[in-house]
Amino acid sequence: MWQFWKRHKRKVYVTLGVFSSGYLLYKLFDARRRRLVDLQQQLAHEKENEELIKAQIQAHFESVQKIADSTTLPRVMHLLDNRLTENLDLSQLTERLIQGKGQPNTLTTVEKHELWDRLKILSFTKMVSSLWAMTMLSLFIRVQVNILGRHLYIDTARGLGSSDLLDEAELIEKSDEQQFLACADYLSNYGLLALISNAESASLEILKGKATEGFFQCLALSNTFIHILETLMIMRSPHYWVGYLMPEDAGVYQPSSSGGSDPSHVTKFESLMVETRAVLSSAEFANTVDVSLRAVANAVLEDVFFHSGENNLIKSGMPLARLLPRIARVSQLLLTEPNRSRYTFDSVNCELKIGSDLQKG
């Protein structure tokens, strides 16, 4: 036995070494395989949770979007329409001109000229103010909804992997949403007078030297409105117009519908407002605004051309004095349904681009 061991011990050691190495490799391979299986299961579980969260977020986002389109936007536009009518009432001017036409001795030549000049400026001011406010409010509310959706996704993503947090992951509470969306009223309640004043200044600048007896053709009228809008957008400073839509300091602004000033909500509200201002001040949004304003302006002017007889405007033009009543009529109907929906539809693609850019942010 001893002789056998002495003769074969090397082989025994080698065999034991091979078996030990094989067993060790097997254990290492099995441990790694288990880790890979566990990792795959974990990834599958996380993916399943992520899909569930995305579905919940999408449902919530669509709900907020539906509320904004069906409730917030019509209510805001109705308030805006009332405010514009209160501050830009052209009826007194037109009544005095009609009276002067029926009773020639009631107005002097100078008075008639002043009334016509005033009607010219205010007609363009009302059209530009209405067009700008309608387009920008539509874009502003779209920005709000997309910011809420993106924040909800970020907040919810922090709870990935914990099913207990799925129902609690909406860190932006209803009170924050309502307070944030209520800021769409800021233009009508606070920013409108400044908008009207600057729109009037822009109209005075562009219409300077254009007499009411002068003839306007389609292209000239379109260029006039576009130039007034462009002037309005750069008055005082490149982003001064943001102040028409939202307060400079969100911390001191409390929308009437916010239902109080709970300090736990102020910080979140302020962060949403800061992000909104950053979006409105961005170069991408400036491009969207430019395209949207031009699209809506073209759609509105088509109605002016239609009411004025497009062939007349194309061929020989029409005196500005005859165009003013058409401009005033279209601006009066601009914010009412179904006209508003038809005009804002021309900027829907631009608004959707905002949503796409924000979701990438």
Image (tube, grey):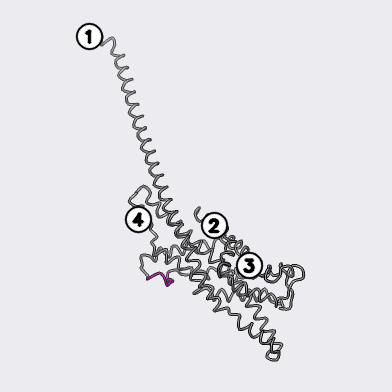
Query: Which numbered dot is residue 50?
Result: none
Image coordinates of residue 344 in percent, x first then y, are 57, 64
Q: Which of 285 and 4 is in front in this view?
A: 285
- Give the spatial CA distance, label 3 vs label 1: 111 Å
Image coordinates of residue 255 in percent, x first then y, are 43, 71
- Give the spatial CA distance, label 2 vs label 1: 90 Å
Q: Nearer the viewer, residue 253 or 17?
A: 253
Residue marked by disc 1? 1
Q: Which of marks 4 and 3 is in front?
A: 3
Magenta region, residue range: 251-260
Badge 4 amino acid: Glu
Q: Are marks 4 and 1 in contact (CB under 8 Å)?
A: no
Residue marked by disc 4? 168
Residue marked by disc 3? 300
Q: Is mark 4 on a helix, strand or loop?
A: loop
Residue positioned 49% across, 54% down in the render: 359
